[in-house]
Amino acid sequence: MVPLQEETYIEYTGHRIPLVIIRERRRTVRVAFSRKTVTLRLPWTLAASENNKHIENSKKWVIDQLKRKPGLIHHFYTRIYRHGETIRVAGRQYVLYMLEHEGKTSKAQLKGQLIELKLAPGKEEEKNEIIKYLVSRLIANDCHEMVEARVRELNRMTYNRPIQTVRLKLNQSNWGSCSSKGNINLSARLLFAPREVMDYVIIHELAHLVEHNHGPRFWALVAKAMPGYQSCEQWLKDNSHLCEF
């Protein structure tokens, strides 16, 4: 049987938060925040009255989470880029200069601190996603040398293990990763975070060069290199909405 899906919304402080309800082959009920929606997964064997009860309970749970963590509401905002806007990251600032052009594809180039965007015709929502991609790529490229230097400096100060490449790109699914070959990948979203928070993520990934898991020995390595790292973890949990292009 194909999963059944419907969409509704939750009203909260003047906002309409999309709620996607999916009925599928499963035994448990699960509700979770996604990037732009809340998703509720229900067993398709439930009676209508049970479905309605879980939907209402889920709405109450979402509102309770939003009250406890006000920053969550920012996940449901649509980012709008504007001509002349200034983006400040990692002690640097960039100004957006946007113009329309008749080409089939949008382009961007960095001229000092000016990001010049030549935008092809299209829907506003699509343009915003294109701008986000182009801007994040340009800024990541511009900041890459600085970030790589910090990664290698922290490695010398801590574990001193071989590193192959350091990549900085827009990644929404995690803050960083480390491959078994010694490749360090960091999300460009970290450029919006305080310096010590970025250092924590770097140290976290460097520790994986020694321990390829999240066991007690791994966390002992992180704690030795950065006592009190938990405050940085908490900052990321509470303020991830501030780290968005």
Image: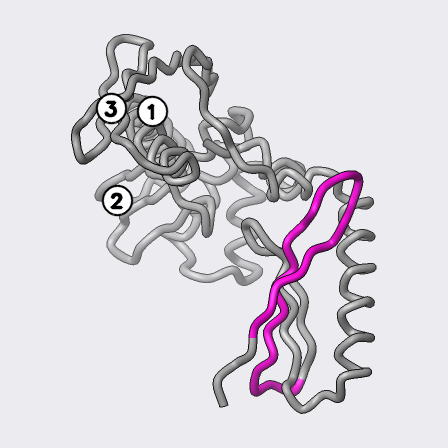
* Most frequent secondary structure within the magenta stretch: strand
Amino acid type of the residue that numbered disc 1 sits on in the rendered structure: Ile
**Picture layout, residue 124 above or below residue 50:** above
Query: Percent from the top left, x then y, of residue 197?
Result: 55, 32
Residue 108's label in the rendered image is 3
Q: Nearer the viewer, residue 41 or 126?
A: 126
**Distance from label 2 to label 1 (Cα)?**
27 Å
Where the C terminus falls, by quadrant? top left
**Picture layout, residue 7 above or below residue 133:** below
> Mark 1 or mark 2, which is nearer the start of the sequence?
1
User: Magenta part of the protein: which range?
Assistant: 5-27
Q: Which residue is mark 2?
A: 162
The residue sitting at the top extreme is: 112
Q: Nearer the viewer, residue 3 or 171?
A: 3
The crowd level at tag 3 (other Cα within 10 Å; few <14, some 14-19, many 20+) is some
Q: Are marks 3 and 2 in contact (CB under 8 Å)?
A: no
> Mark 1 or mark 3, which is nearer the start of the sequence?
3
13 in magenta: yes
Residue 139's label in the rendered image is 1
Q: Are marks 2 and 1 in contact (CB under 8 Å)?
A: no
